Every structure is written in structure tokens, then in C-alpha cells.
Amino acid sequence: MTLLYLHGGLMVLALAILAGGAAVARFHRRRKWWLKIHRLLGTAGPLAVFFGLISAYAAIELIGGLQFAVPHAWFGLLVIAIVLITQSAGLMQFTVPARAALLRSLHRWMGRASLVLMTFAMSSGMYLFFYS
């Protein structure tokens, strides 16, 4: 049970970190430091997501449950994939200049989608936790 609390806490932390990264990009872009902080948060968020995934996997293993037996797990996996695509596109726009505009657009739209989808994934996780 403790690992499920850890999972929830890490995912809430990940959402807060990623939302902070989006807020920095949106509201502080004119400051010199914005990109450094945005990159830092854009790396810390997926790390929190990764450790949240590990804690959920361990919790399900300990109780002897089936992995990916509920829609929340599949939805969470989709969110994790989108978070990783968002981070990759954000980093690649600096290393693949020929595709920078496309990668920047992908990064922005996937970032928005990941924040929205994370809130839905969390809602389904809370429903699962409290009502099943």
C-alpha cells in the first residue's frame, strides 16, 4: 500500500514539475534564465514519472496483481510515452537544426497534451484507488 502512495505522490510531483516547466516557458521567456530552468524541469518531470512507474510496477508485483489489468495502467503508459516524446522533441530541436521548427511545434503541442492527459490519468488513478 505504501508503494501506491509513493506512486501517487511521484505522479503528482511530476505533474507539478512539468506544469512549472510549461509556466516558465510561457511566462518567463524574456528572462535570460528561462531556458535553463525549463530544461531542468523538463528533465526532472520525466524522472519523477519514471520513478512513479517503477513504484506502481513494484506495488502491483507485491500484491500479486496483473500488470496492465486496468484502463488506468494503459492510460498511464500512453501519458508516459507522450512525456518522453515531448522531452525528446524539446532536446532534439537543438541538435537537429534542419528540423528545429517541426520539433519545436511537436514539443509545444505534446507538452500541452501531456499536461491535460496527466490530469485525466491521475483522476482515473484516484478513482481506482478510492473506489475499488
Image (spheres, rainbow, N blue to C red):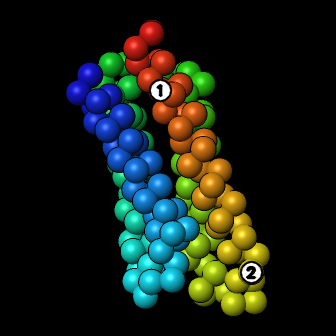
| Residue 29: percent from left, percent from top | 52, 78
Mark sitting on residue 68: none
Residues 132 and 21: in front is: 21
- The residue type indicated by label 2 comes to Ala
| Residue 45: percent from left, percent from top | 42, 57
Residue in view at x 60 percent, y 58 percent: 111
What is the CA distance from the residue labelled 1 to the residue labelled 2? 35 Å
- The residue type indicated by label 1 comes to Gly
Q: Is residue 93 left or right of residue 18?
A: right
* Residue holding disc 2: 101
- Residue 34 position by quadrant: bottom left
Mark sitting on residue 125: 1
- Residue 95 position by quadrant: bottom right
Local packing at callout 1 (Cα closer than 10 Å; few below 14, some 14-19, many 20+) is many
User: If you read the primary sequence from the N terminus, does the residue marked by circle 1 or circle 2 appear first?
Assistant: 2
Q: Is residue 18 left or right of residue 107?
A: left
Residue in view at x 47 percent, y 18 percent: 128
Tell me the element at label 1: helix
| Residue 57: percent from left, percent from top | 40, 35
Q: Is residue 14 left or right of residue 116?
A: left
| Residue 20: percent from left, percent from top | 43, 59
Residue in view at x 58 percent, y 73 percent: 90
Q: Residue furthest left?
A: 2
Q: Height in image: 47 above or below 56?
A: below
Residue in view at x 36 percent, y 34 percent: 8
Q: Is residue 75 left or right of residue 3?
A: right
